[in-house]
């Protein structure tokens, strides 16, 4: 049972890595900085693990570390999406209509 | 044991939708016209996943979750509003935060499960904690160097790579012992602490020009550690997000190492900053260079049809991008075709120059990648280099004895006239003399980039009105 879970997880990892390579290879070098801040924000989905730790109340240590982990991940989510959008907003094509 | 295992289908479906949105999010990043949809897709996916998790039945106490979410948002907003010039250090800091989250979760998972941790579980847990903690201190060091609170100069010593590999090796050995005997819980803090030290050691020899590669590498490590955490928690969503981030960082690292003509293994083992030894290898006596005033530079630029501007980190340091925009505007108005030549490793992180120039309102279709631009240099009347050095050094193409030989460069020396704005004749980061400066067609424009470009703009504006 546990063994098959692991194998499934490995499949998921490998397939996701392939998708990642194919999708990200196509990202214009223009956008490599926002790409990095976006993937960083997406990576902060780790917050779900931290939420469960902090909320399950299994041990004091888990609650404390989980809470700190939520703070770290949430700041990446909020800050990451915010700055990515700010950067992308700046990319304009030739002769933008000046306000 | 496995909080994500299939007990409730709606939650799993929510995670699946989030995973699809994450992939779409990256897919839409392929072009500036759709990229903002990508951010929205990512945000919606993230929101769904968090809401779904909050409704998860295993949660008994919401107080600390609320504290964490609120505190994180309070810290996150200013980090999302930093000035564009501070984006590299902000990104490094966010790698550190991501790695911190992963490391802390891994640590609690270990103590919740110990001493009965199956070998595979212990292996991925070790990978999570080792990658997480070395990324944490490594990214903090990188952020410190970028913010210039730490010395930017690379610090190297003999046998550095050996020491670093030894330290990492010890961590791996401890991990192996823990996999075989997870009941030795006292070894866990050791496995946590050694990579923290390694992260510092890894960044100590890094100089400014290596930063784009290092940033990409840390990005990749952060992703892989998150994927390892996904294995520990049996969370497919986290595995997918981590794999995407890991792949992204990996591709960027390969791009950056290619653009610096380093082998990828050279990069992986942190053998950065090795080129320091080259200092003073070139001819010692001062060779004659031709210099020019802003008036002369303005006259040459206004007589040109095709101009390529090559920005480097020096432009960012001098905060000259807005003056460069003025120059772009005034030249374009006079019918001059102006493009920008962007080297992949220009600046301190991948794509750094593009963001700075986009911020200064320069249209992105004028920002041209090295490979697309190089064939056009022979038809270029003026190449104007602003604060870039090694990425324009023709020795990389012609001189096999040069330490940067083989590194792809922007072929500015093929333009009819080359103008280089530079503070003085000091060599670039790698300490390598640049033969470009001694060419007959090269004019050196000595001064601060912002002031000098401003002076050229004033000259052009003056003649324009007169």
Image: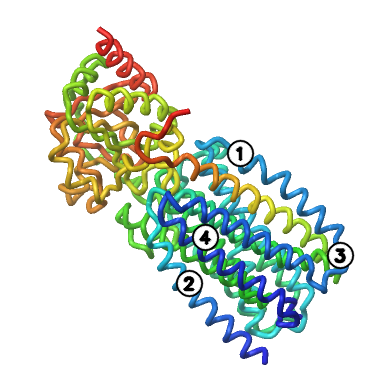
User: Which residue is drawn at the image coordinates 61% and 56% (left, top)?
Assistant: B43
Q: Chain of mark 1?
A: B
Q: Chain of mark 3?
A: A
Label 2 sits on residue: A17
**Foreground tag (1 vs 4):** 4
Label 1 sits on residue: B81
Q: Which mark is residue B304?
A: none
Q: Are marks 4 and 2 in contact (CB under 8 Å)?
A: no
Neighbor class of circle 1 (other Cα within 10 Å; few <14, some 14-19, many 20+) is some
- How far apart in space, not on screen, are marks 4 and 3 (Cα)? 37 Å
The answer to which quarter of the image holds residue B311 is top left
Residue B334 left/right relative to B210: left
- Across and down, in percent, residue B39 comes to 55, 53
User: Which residue is drawn at the image coordinates 23% and 37% (left, top)?
Assistant: B434
Label 4 sits on residue: B25
Element on which disc 1 rests: loop
Depth check: give the residue in front, B198 or B89: B89
- Across and down, in percent, residue A17 comes to 48, 72
Depth check: give the residue in front, B261 or B75: B75
Residue B375 seen anywhere in this rendered image of the structure = yes
Label 3 sits on residue: A60
Q: How is the image coloured?
A: rainbow
Q: Are marks 4 and 3 on the same chain?
A: no
- How far apart in space, not on screen, are marks 3 and 1 (Cα)? 34 Å
- Across and down, in percent, residue B220 comes to 50, 62
- Across and down, in percent, residue B438 comes to 17, 30
- How far apart in space, not on screen, are marks 4 and 2 (Cα)? 15 Å
Neighbor class of circle 2 (other Cα within 10 Å; few <14, some 14-19, many 20+) is many
Element on which disc 2 rests: helix
Residue B56 left/right relative to B274: right
**Foreground tag (4 vs 2):** 4
């Amino acid at each position: 049972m546990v063994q098959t879970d692991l194998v499934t997880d490995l499949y998921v990892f490998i397939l996701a890595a392939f998708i990642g390579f194919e999708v990200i290879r196509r990202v214009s070098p223009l956008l490599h900085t926002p790409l990095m801040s976006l993937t960083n924000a997406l990576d902060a989905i780790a917050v779900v693990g931290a939420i469960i730790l902090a909320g399950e109340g299994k041990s004091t240590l888990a609650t404390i570390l989980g809470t700190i982990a939520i703070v770290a991940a949430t700041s990446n989510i909020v800050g990451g999406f915010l700055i990515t959008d700010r950067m992308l907003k700046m990319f304009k094509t030739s002769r933008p209509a000046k306000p | 044991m496995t909080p994500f295992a299939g007990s409730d289908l709606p939650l799993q479906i929510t995670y699946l939708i989030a995973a699809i949105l994450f992939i779409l999010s990256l897919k839409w990043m392929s072009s500036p016209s759709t990229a903002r949809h990508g951010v929205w897709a990512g945000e919606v996916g993230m929101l769904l996943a968090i809401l779904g998790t909050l409704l998860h039945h295993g949660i008994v106490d919401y107080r600390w979750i609320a504290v964490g979410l609120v505190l994180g948002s309070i810290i996150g907003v200013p980090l999302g509003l930093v000035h564009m010039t501070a984006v590299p250090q902000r990104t490094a800091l966010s790698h550190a935060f991501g790695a911190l989250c992963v490391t802390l979760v891994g640590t609690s998972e270990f103590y919740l499960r110990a001493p009965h941790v199956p070998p595979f579980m212990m292996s991925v847990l070790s990978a999570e904690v080792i990658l997480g903690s070395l990324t944490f201190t490594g990214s903090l060091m990188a952020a410190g160097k970028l913010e210039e609170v730490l010395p930017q100069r690379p610090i190297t010593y003999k046998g550095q790579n050996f020491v670093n590999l030894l330290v990492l090796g010890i961590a791996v050995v401890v991990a192996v012992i823990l996999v075989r005997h997870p009941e030795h819980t006292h070894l866990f803090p050791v496995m946590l602490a050694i990579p923290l030290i390694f992260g510092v050691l890894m960044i100590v020899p890094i100089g400014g020009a290596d930063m784009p590669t290092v940033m990409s590498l840390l990005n990749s490590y952060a992703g892989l550690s998150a994927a390892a955490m996904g294995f520990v928690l049996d969370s497919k969503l986290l595995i997918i997000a981590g794999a995407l981030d890991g792949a992204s960082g990996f591709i960027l690292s390969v791009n950056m190492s290619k653009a610096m003509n380093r082998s990828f293994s050279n990069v992986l083992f942190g053998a950065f900053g090795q080129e320091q030894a080259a200092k003073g290898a070139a001819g010692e006596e001062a060779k004659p260079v031709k210099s020019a005033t802003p008036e002369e530079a303005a006259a040459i630029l206004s007589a040109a049809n095709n101009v390529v501007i090559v920005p480097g980190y020096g432009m960012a340091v001098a905060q000259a991008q807005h003056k460069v925009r003025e120059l772009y505007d005034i030249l374009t108005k006079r019918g001059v075709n102006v493009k920008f030549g962007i080297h992949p490793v220009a600046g301190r992180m991948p794509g750094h120059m593009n963001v700075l120039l986009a911020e200064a309102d320069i249209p992105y279709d004028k920002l041209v990648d090295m490979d697309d631009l190089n064939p056009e240099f022979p038809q270029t009347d003026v190449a104007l280099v602003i604060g870039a050095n090694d990425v324009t050094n023709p020795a990389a193409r012609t001189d096999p004895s040069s330490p940067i030989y083989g590194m792809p460069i922007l072929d500015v020396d093929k333009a009819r006239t080359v103008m280089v704005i530079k503070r003085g004749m000091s060599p670039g980061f790698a300490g390598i003399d640049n033969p470009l400066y001694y060419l007959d067609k090269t004019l050196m424009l000595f001064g601060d980039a912002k002031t000098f470009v401003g002076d050229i703009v004033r000259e052009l504006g003056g003649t324009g009105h007169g």
